[in-house]
Image (cartoon, helix red, strand yellow):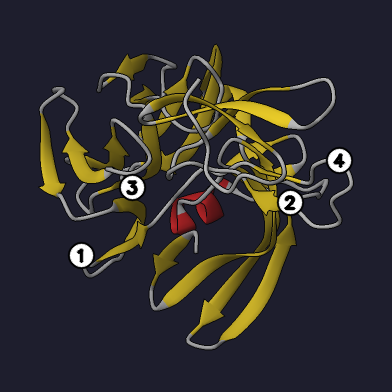
Amino acid sequence: MLAVRSGELALSLNRRFVIGERFVGTLAIALWAAARRVRSTRTSRKPTGQKRREYGGGSLDRDGLTEERHRVSCRPHPAQTNHSIRFLRVSPDGQRVAFVEEALARGTGGHVAVVDVNGNVTELTREWDSVRGLAWTLVGDEIWFAAGAARSNRALRAVNLAHRERVVLDAPGSLTLWDIAADGRVLLSRDDERRAVVAAGPGATVERDLSWFDDTGLAAISDDGKRILGGDRPGAFLRPTTGRPRPFCS
C-alpha cells in the first residue's frame, strides 16, 4: 500500500528491496479487488504535480516514482540537501512539501521537515531512529508521521508548523502510516519486525538462522567460515555456523 484516495488504493506491485527500507516497484490503482497498473518505477516520463498531490505517495527522481536523494522541489524554487529524502507529501493548499530527511542515508530514520514555494526548508522534529510514513491532515494544520526510538516501537505522531508535537496513537508493536483518507480515516499497519543473521557454514547445504533474539547484527566472520561474531540486545556473542544450536557470550 502507498496511499488511499476516493475509495481507491495506490499500490506498489512487484516491489523489490533496494537498501535500508527503500523499495522500487510498479504503481497501480486498486478499487476493492481489481488493480490497474499505472506506471513502473523505471520510466522516462514524470508524473504530474496533480497526480502527486492526489495520491501523495513516493517521490520523484530522474527515473520516475521512487525514493529521491538530495533534491526536493516545491515550484518555483527548489531546495537542495546532501541528506536522504523520503516520504514526500504535498500540503492540501499546494504551498508546501513535507518529507523525512536523514543525514546518515540509512533509509530508516530521520526528522520531519517542510519546504515552501520559496525554497525555505524548516525542520519540525528531532531525529528519530525509525520513521515510516508521513501524511498531511485534511486541512493541512498538522503533519502526521510514524516514528520511534527503534523499529519495534513506532507510534503515530503529529507535528504542526509551530513545532508543537503530540502522540496520536501509541499501540503495541510498531506502526506504519500509509495515508489519511478524504473522510478522515487513517490507513495504518502494525508491523512485527526482526533483524536476523542466516548462514550456510562450511559443508552445509542449507542456511541456518544464527540469530540470538530479534535484533541480531553481524560483526565478523572467521576466516574458515566456522564462526560468526554478532550482537543483539543483551550484548555481543560468538557462535559457530554449524553444530551448537545456541550462541555463547564472548
Residue linked to disc 3: 135
Residue linked to disc 2: 41
Seen at 23% across and 45% down, the residue is: 155
Residue at the extreme front of the image, as rendered: 244
Query: Is 145 on the left or on the right of 245, as rendered?
Result: left
- Distance of mark 2 from mark 4, alpha carbons? 39 Å
Residue 151: image location, x then y, percent: 38, 40
Q: Which mark is residue 184?
A: 1
The tag earlier along the polypeptide, 2 or 3, is 2
In the image, is residue 128 above or below residue 147? above
* Label 4 packing within 10 angstroms: few (<14), some (14-19), many (20+): few
Element on which disc 2 rests: loop
* Label 1 packing within 10 angstroms: few (<14), some (14-19), many (20+): few
State if disc 4 and disc 2 touch (CB < 8 Å).
no
Disc 4 versus disc 1: nearer the observer: 4
Residue linked to disc 4: 202
Residue at the extreme right of the image, as rendered: 203
Count of numbered badges drawn on the protein: 4
